[in-house]
Amino acid sequence: MRKNILNLINPVWAIGVIAVLFSACQRPAVSLPIGQEIEVKLHQTYQVDNTLSFTIENVQDSRCPMDAICIQAGKAEVKVQCKLENKSSWYTIDPENQPEIRLGNYQLRFTELFPYPQSTVRVRDEDYTLKVLISAL
């Protein structure tokens, strides 16, 4: 009888541990104000109001390092997932040339991507921040 109880507890325990681990991986959305420029990070969801949220999913940064001489300036592309009224859309923006996304009654303007590359420093995803200004249209 005791062995049967232990066999039942083990799967329940394992499911509980898995549920705790998955819930720890999901960060709650951060609320952002309208009309203020704010720095945002990769892989964090930001909530503008009850209808609009966005997540910076990926950065492709080929900008010329500040301590190098390059033939081309390069560019940075940022992949953003936006949800407006639970409908998802994906956008690729260039903060220097095409920094805006218009969704419904909102404009998201991404103005600067930090840090600027250096030839001697490897930038990890978690090190990137992006300035965004959210405006009501």
Image (tube, rainbow, N blue to C red):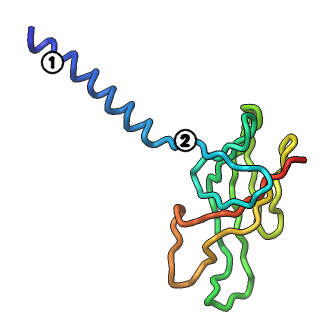
Query: Residue tagged by mark 1?
Result: 6
Counting from the top left corner in percent of width and height, residue 104 is at: 86, 40
Q: Is residue 129 above or below residue 120?
A: above
Using the image, tell me which numbered label, if any, was put on residue 122: none
Q: Is residue 115 above or below residue 99?
A: below
From this view, report whether residue 115 is shown above or below residue 58: below
Q: CA distance from mark 2 to mark 1?
A: 35 Å
- Residue 63, quarter of the rendered image: bottom right
Q: Residue at x 74, y 56 (%)?
A: 92
**In screen coordinates, is 46 left or right of 107?**
left
Select label 2 or label 1 by which is in front: 2
Q: Residues within 10 Å of mark 1 (few under 14, many from 20)?
A: few
| Element class at badge 1 | helix
Of 35 and 118, nearer the camera is 35
Which residue carries the number 2 mark? 28
Q: Residue 100: horizontal and vertical position, in percent?
A: 83, 57
Residue at 9%, 8% in the rendered image: 1
Q: Amino acid at mark 2?
A: Pro
Viewer-closest of 67 and 23: 23
